[in-house]
Image (tube, grey):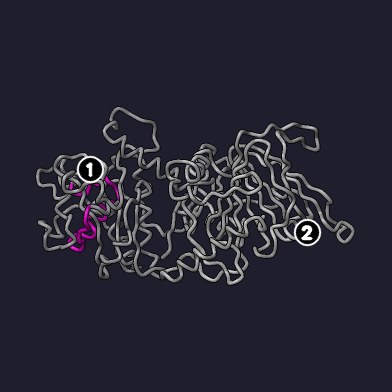
């Protein structure tokens, strides 16, 4: 299954053509494609009238998805103003036959007393009161089998509209399309549409409609469609009734967008030309920092409370897997740490997703002694710093054997920054943070430590017996617990 985002803006777009458009934030595994890559149908003719909203003119681009039959057998299209809140994979049991379109009916309470929006709550098509030839669907979610033949038929239909003689006549209203491609698709697929349950396209205003809210409780929704006012827009009086839904969208965005995911020029972030050592300031957003700290210290950290250990005065929390002679048996990293690990892999910071995260909690004045991370891990580390700054010192151990390398390197770790080091920086240098109330840089700048500093060290174990997804039996879970007991007894040797 591929997840695609079609956009007219690049993920790292900051060019002069759109200075006010922020970079797109892409979840790990999501592919970005230029909207211009989609085949297009002819320009909509003037006889269909202007769209109800100016932005509807962009929606015609979705028709090009039908031309992707050389890539995909089935396509599920979703508008960008939809929020998935349930198991969207349930759509896989609703795959249509060739030539058939599946969609959720539109809520027509505003124009009809016979609105059947929630009549399709059952997936049994025989329960639906209207025939496929008469109901009107919302085009925010569409499920279909792409077909170049169907795409060409759409082009022909559009050309036929362009050459019609209805413009200006009494019948011209019959081809007006204020909802743009939605009206066109309803016309083109008339008699070939099968309804989907409204849970897959829960229209925001319908969730507050007394006629529908009992049949479609928010708890049963799979995807909420933010038609009309958008949750990212400034609040308005007209949208006050939907503020709780808008707040849910904003909360999900905060949880699922932990970093400003950009295509990075790693060469510009390198700290020394001879070392694989990179620093990215402001890597995580303030919202992500808050989410991570809540995961470790807040109300959501109840399951981790018994996992903290004290090591040389600082508090330490190990997540994922532990290095073991038999190979690590891993556990799943908690969200949002797991999402952060996926992003590090996607953006090339690490060669794969990390399977261990060490969370170090330092009080002011605490540091960590000079050490190697050692051969039990792949020779790459990503360190995310939260809450407070610290000065990290690297020291080359065998100076005479490597005269081409700098003997010492210092890195100022500011809150929300990311440090990545690999290969020679990992294998030939020890690193430390002094036990001090403040740090003084080589330039003489004095940096006061914060009351608490939290550091996330994300690594990949060199020897893994079982990934988290492979631990399915009680015997395997017991073996993993045994490894953790062993690690507790050896913790002082790992640091």
Task: Report whether 451 appears left or right of 340.
Answer: right
Q: Are marks 2 and 1 in contact (CB under 8 Å)?
A: no
Judge whether residue 470 can be spotted in this image: no
Looking at the image, which is closer to me, 224 or 481? 481
The span picked out in magenta is 174-198
Closest to the observer, 105 or 292: 292
Front position among marks 2 and 1: 2
Q: Secondary structure at mark 1?
A: helix
Q: Is residue 233 above or below residue 461?
A: above
Q: Which residue is mark 1?
A: 207
The residue that mark 2 highlights is 428
Where's the C terminus, which quadrant? bottom right
Label 2 element class: loop
Locate residue 77 relative to residue 278 in the image: left or right. left
Identified at 21% across, 56% down, the residue is 197
* Residue lying at 29% horizontally and 31% vertically, measured from the top left: 240
Residue at 90% over, 58% down = 400
Q: Position of residue 233 (x, y in %)?
A: 39, 35
Asked if the stretch drawn in magenta spans residue 186, the answer is yes
Residue found at x 79% / y 55%: 274
Q: Tell which circle, 2 or 1, labels the residue nearer the N-terminal end.
A: 1
Cα distance between the residues tagged 2 and 1:
60 Å
Q: Residue furthest top?
A: 237
- Mark 2 Cα shell of 10 Å, populated few (<14), some (14-19), many (≥20): some
- Residue 109 lies in magenta, yes or no? no
Count of number-bearing discs: 2
């Amino acid at each position: 299954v591929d997840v695609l985002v079609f956009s007219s803006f690049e993920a790292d777009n900051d060019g002069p053509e759109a200075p006010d458009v922020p970079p797109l934030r892409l979840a790990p595994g999501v592919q970005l494609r230029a909207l211009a890559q989609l085949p297009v149908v002819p320009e909509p003719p003037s006889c269909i009238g202007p769209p109800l909203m100016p932005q509807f003119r962009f929606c015609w681009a979705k028709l090009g998805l039908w031309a992707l039959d050389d890539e995909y057998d089935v396509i599920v299209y979703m508008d960008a103003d939809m929020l998935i809140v349930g198991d969207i994979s349930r759509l896989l049991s609703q795959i249509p036959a060739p030539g058939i379109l599946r969609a959720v009916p539109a809520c027509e309470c505003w124009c009809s007393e016979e609105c059947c929006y929630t009549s399709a709550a059952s997936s049994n098509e025989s329960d639906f009161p209207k025939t496929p030839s008469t109901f009107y669907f919302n085009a925010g979610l569409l499920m279909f089998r792409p077909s170049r033949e169907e795409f060409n038929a759409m082009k022909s239909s559009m050309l036929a509209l362009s050459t019609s003689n209805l413009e200006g006549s009494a019948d011209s209203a019959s081809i007006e399309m204020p909802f743009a491609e939605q009206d066109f698709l309803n016309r083109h697929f008339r008699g070939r549409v099968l309804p989907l349950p409204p849970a897959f396209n829960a229209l925001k205003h319908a969730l507050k409609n007394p006629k529908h809210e009992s049949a479609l409780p928010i708890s049963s929704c799979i995807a909420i469609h933010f038609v009309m006012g958008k949750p990212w827009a400034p609040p308005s009086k007209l949208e006050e009734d939907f503020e709780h839904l808008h707040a849910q969208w904003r909360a999900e965005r905060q949880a699922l967008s932990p970093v400003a995911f950009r295509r990075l020029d790693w060469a510009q972030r390198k700290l020394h030309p001879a070392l694989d050592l990179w620093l990215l300031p402001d890597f995580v957003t303030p919202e992500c920092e808050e989410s991570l700290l809540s995961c470790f210290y807040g109300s959501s950290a109840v399951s981790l409370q018994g996992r903290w250990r004290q090591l040389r005065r600082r508090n330490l929390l190990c997540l994922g897997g532990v290095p073991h002679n038999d190979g690590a048996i891993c556990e799943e990293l908690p969200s949002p740490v797991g999402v952060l690990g996926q992003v590090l892999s996607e953006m090339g910071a690490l060669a794969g997703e990390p399977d261990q995260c060490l969370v170090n909690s330092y009080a002011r004045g605490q540091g960590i002694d000079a050490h190697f991370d050692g051969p039990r891990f792949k020779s790459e580390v990503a360190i995310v710093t939260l809450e407070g700054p610290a000065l990290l010192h690297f020291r080359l151990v065998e100076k005479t054997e490597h005269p081409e390398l700098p003997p010492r390197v210092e890195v100022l770790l500011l809150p929300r920054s990311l440090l990545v080091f690999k290969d020679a920086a990992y294998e030939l240098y020890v690193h430390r943070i002094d036990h001090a109330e403040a740090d003084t840089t080589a330039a003489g700048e004095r940096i006061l430590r914060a009351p608490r500093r939290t550091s996330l060290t994300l690594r990949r174990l060199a020897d893994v017996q079982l990934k988290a997804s492979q631990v399915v039996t009680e015997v395997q879970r017991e073996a993993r617990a045994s490894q953790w007991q062993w690690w507790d007894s050896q913790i002082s040797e790992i640091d």
